[in-house]
Amino acid sequence: MPVMPWLERLREWDEAGFRLINGSLRNQIFDLLMPFVSNKWNFAIPVAVLLIYVLIFRPKRDRIIVVSAIAVILLTDGTSHILKDLFQRTRPFHPLRDATHLVSFSFPSNHASNMFALATFLSYNYSRSGLLCFPLAALVGYSRIYVGSHYPFDVLGGAFWGVLIGLLGAAAVQRLMRSARVQHARRSRGKKDHPSCGPETFQ
């Protein structure tokens, strides 16, 4: 079965999906909401406050998970940039619009990959958090299409990559935490088996 016709068909579906979301489905509410959601700096202060709260007031396990979540996002973001350079797909506004934008690569969407990695990682550790995190990640992904920065397949590819990195990160952190608990238990048993020597007390 020829490969190129299928790739061409996928490209046509991708552009049709972009035109649907970016054009036909536009409305006044989304014109205000989607640019706000798409701009990550709008969430910088709430996220910073949450991080400070967790690092100061929450138990050690929560602090470890938060620091690990930051590492997962950094890993996802860095590898997504590598994939962008590998695929070198231009953004929708370059071939489809006459706007004056610098050419930048589009696949996968870093916003989508980062958000889905975070949603996967957090829901792995806090199952109920997925009820909030995954819809928020999907909303961010949709916003990237709505504002014209990505094709739908860019977002889907980013979501897939983010889920993969999130699962790998969660599994690695859980394994490290289990290993740390085992080592702590062994040290505790060792102290009980070998009590410190001292003067004996006779009654």
Image: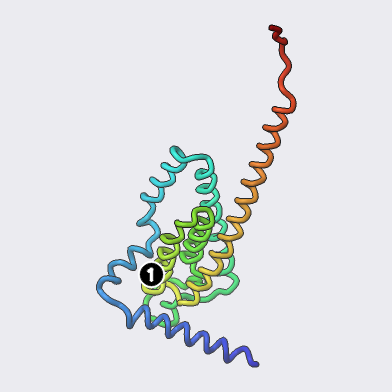
Q: Name the residue under label 1.
A: 143
Vertical position of residue 16 compared to residue 50: above or below: below
Label 1 crowding class (10 Å Cα cut-off): few <14, some 14-19, many 20+? many
Residue 185 at what x, y percent from top left? Answer: 67, 37
Residue 9 at what x, y percent from top left? Answer: 52, 89
Residue 131 at what x, y percent from top left? Answer: 43, 61
- Pick whichever, 97 or 194, lies toward us: 194
Vertical position of residue 173 compared to residue 59: above or below: below
Q: Residue placed at 70% from the left, 32% from the top? A: 189
Q: At label 1, which amino acid type do we have?
A: Ser
Quarter of the rendering occupied by the C terminus: top right
Quadrant location of residue 32? bottom left
Quadrant location of residue 1? bottom right
- Pick whichever, 151 or 170, lies toward us: 170
Q: Residue placed at 62% from the left, 89% from the top? A: 3
Q: Residue placed at 72% from the left, 22% from the top? A: 195
- Pick whichever, 81 or 188, lies toward us: 188
Residue 21 at what x, y percent from top left? Answer: 37, 79
* Residue extending farthest left: 28
Tell me the colour scheme of the image: rainbow
Q: Residue placed at 51% from the left, 85% from the top? A: 11
Q: Is 184 situated left or right of 12 in this image?
A: right
* Residue extending farthest front: 203
